Image (cartoon, rainbow, N blue to C red):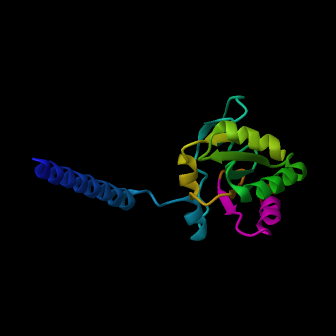
Amino acid sequence: MARPVRLTAQALAVAVVVGLLALLIWRVAHQDTATVSKALDQGDHPTAPAFDLARLDGRGRIDLAALRGKKPLVLDFWASWCTPCIQESRRLEAAMRKYGDRVAFIGVDTKDFSADARSWQRQHGITYPSVHDGGGKVLAKWGGLPIPRIFFVARSGKVVGELIVEEDLPRYLRRIAES
């Protein structure tokens, strides 16, 4: 009696593994691979994908679409567990002091716990507003991991660039501040 039970359990385990593998293959084949980052790589300047997310500080929400036409903006995708995010967020904080009257700076805490993110902001002196994208759905539309990912959006709502090298920050800031 023990042998048939063991064979049944093994067959069931194999069936579960095969089912999960099939689900993974289907998901990879059907995922939306059109991201802002890929569009920029191809020379396109897509309209920034809209989001409406809760602010980390609890003071309401930020609706990206509602900001279109008001000010150009810098989007900083970060997380409290991301070591390189510290330096980039500090650079953006300094840039905000210079360009803050002409450019809006918004952080997007992603794949993170909001309590950890709030503590991280205080610890590193980051004062520009951030929203919480806990599951990473917004990040996925912009290009996914790795982070930090920093994008520059013109007043029109078109994404003009992504920070790839250190020199991109002043170059794109000047460009969008004039738009």
130 on left or right of 10: right
Q: Residue at x 54, y 53 (%)?
A: 141
Q: Looking at this view, is 145 or 4 the one in front?
A: 4
In the image, residue 174 lies in the stretch drawn in magenta: yes
Q: Which quadrant holds residue 27?
A: bottom left
Q: Residue at x 61, y 52 (%)?
A: 48
Q: Position of residue 73 (x, y in %)?
A: 74, 50
Magenta-highlighted residues = 158-175
Q: Residue furthest top?
A: 59
Quarter of the C terminus within the rendering: bottom right
Q: Is residue 179 visible?
A: no
In the image, residue 88 lies in the stretch drawn in magenta: no
Q: Which quadrant holds residue 87?
A: bottom right
Q: Position of residue 15 (x, y in %)?
A: 22, 54
129 on left or right of 34: right
Q: Which quadrant holds residue 29?
A: bottom left
Q: Looking at this view, is 112 or 73 the one in front?
A: 112
